[in-house]
Amino acid sequence: MPRTLGLIGSGMIGTSLARLAVAAGIEVVLSNTRGPDSLAGLVAELGGRARAATPEEAAQAGDLVVAAVPLTAFGRLPAAALAGRTVLDTANYYPERDGRVAELEAGDLTSSALLQRHLPGAHVVKAFNTITPHQLFSLARPAGGPDRSALPLAGDDPEAKTAAARLLDVLGYDAVDIGTLADSWRSEPDTPVYIRPYLGEVPALSVEEFLSWTRQTPGIPVPAAQVGKLVDSAVRRRAGEARLPSDA
Ligand SMILES: NC(=O)c1ccc[n+]([C@@H]2O[C@H](COP(=O)([O-])OP(=O)(O)OC[C@H]3O[C@@H](n4cnc5c(N)ncnc54)[C@H](OP(=O)(O)O)[C@@H]3O)[C@@H](O)[C@H]2O)c1
């Protein structure tokens, strides 16, 4: 089990991961763009296993590092500090938020392969991108439980994927290896495994209403066999066609 998780990005997904990690006995080092002082309230709430730092410090402190940032931040991540590290990438590409990226839309690259290009020395693993923040927290279960959910993982480095799967396990999830970063389109927005299976039936809502609705919905467990089937049934479409609010 990792002793310390570095978090670059401490918004909705980063905060849920920090809560799960602290509950599992893992130290967390949180960071964002606005500086450690802006995270004082969250650190106080998380307790003695949490501290706030700069993105560089979070990168260096973590046995594993999560980049829970929008795609637009990829170029500003601390590449030197992340060299040699396993970096879990939670990002999803939404042109209406992130701007258009021609290579993604041409299918030349997946968004996680784009991150890998920004971080050539790191081992990028795509993870935690298919579940909304509240459900990530509420669906976590101990290993072996009948209502334990699974999440997809993709990456090019087998050891990094093993380390990521160990983290998922202690945070409350089984892992389903869906292949390399090139294969990770199978868990991108608008694919069958993406977000909706963990939510059940979603009413038609605006972005704000959707986020508020997800906070009041416990979510539906999605076991590993179902994740495998959903991933296998994915059909590749042009990236960037999915629209918010299926993600935020
Ligand atoms: N929300 C969802 O339902 C969901 C589900 C799965 C995956 N995702 C994906 O996960 C990623 C994060 O989503 P989120 O909902 O957690 O976003 P969010 O709430 O907007 O949080 C983004 C975080 O990233 C930080 N950040 C931005 N640029 C940074 C940089 N250059 N260096 C360090 N930190 C930086 C922000 O810091 P400041 O606030 O200080 O700027 C903030 O803490 C996105 O790519 C999203 O597509 C989201």
Image (cartoon, rainbow, N blue to C red):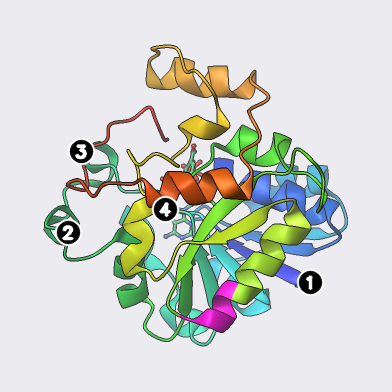
Q: Residue at x 47, y 31 (%)?
A: 196
The residue mark sitting in front, 2 or 4, is: 2
Amino acid at pointer 2: Gly
Q: Quadrant of the N terminus?
A: bottom right
Q: Which residue is mark 4?
A: 91
**Mark 4 or mark 1, earlier in chain:** 1
Q: Measure the C-alpha gap from mark 4 to mark 3.
A: 16 Å
| Neighbour tally class for label 2: few under 14, some 14-19, many 20 plus, Cα within 10 Å | some
**Mark 2 or mark 4, earlier in chain:** 4
Secondary-structure class at tag 2: loop
Give the x, y percent position of residue 186: 36, 53
Q: Can the viewer see residue 73? A: yes
Q: Measure the C-alpha gap from mark 3 to mark 1.
A: 38 Å
Amino acid at pointer 1: Met
Q: Are marks 2 and 4 in contact (CB under 8 Å)?
A: no
Q: Quadrant of the C terminus?
A: top left
Amino acid at pointer 3: Glu
Q: Which residues are magenta?
A: 157-161
| Front residue of 51 and 119 | 119
Label 4 lies in ligand 1 vicinity (Cβ under 8 Å) = yes
* Disc sitting over residue 1 in the figure: 1
Q: Residue at x 38, y 77 (%)?
A: 119
Q: Residue at x 48, y 85 (%)?
A: 83
Q: Residue at x 56, y 78 (%)?
A: 160
The residue mark sitting in front, 4 or 3, is: 3
Q: Which residue is mark 2?
A: 107
Q: Are marks 4 and 3 in contact (CB under 8 Å)?
A: no
Give the x, y percent position of residue 76: 37, 66
Looking at the image, residue 219 sits to the left or right of residue 148; the answer is left
Q: Quadrant of residue 29?
A: bottom right
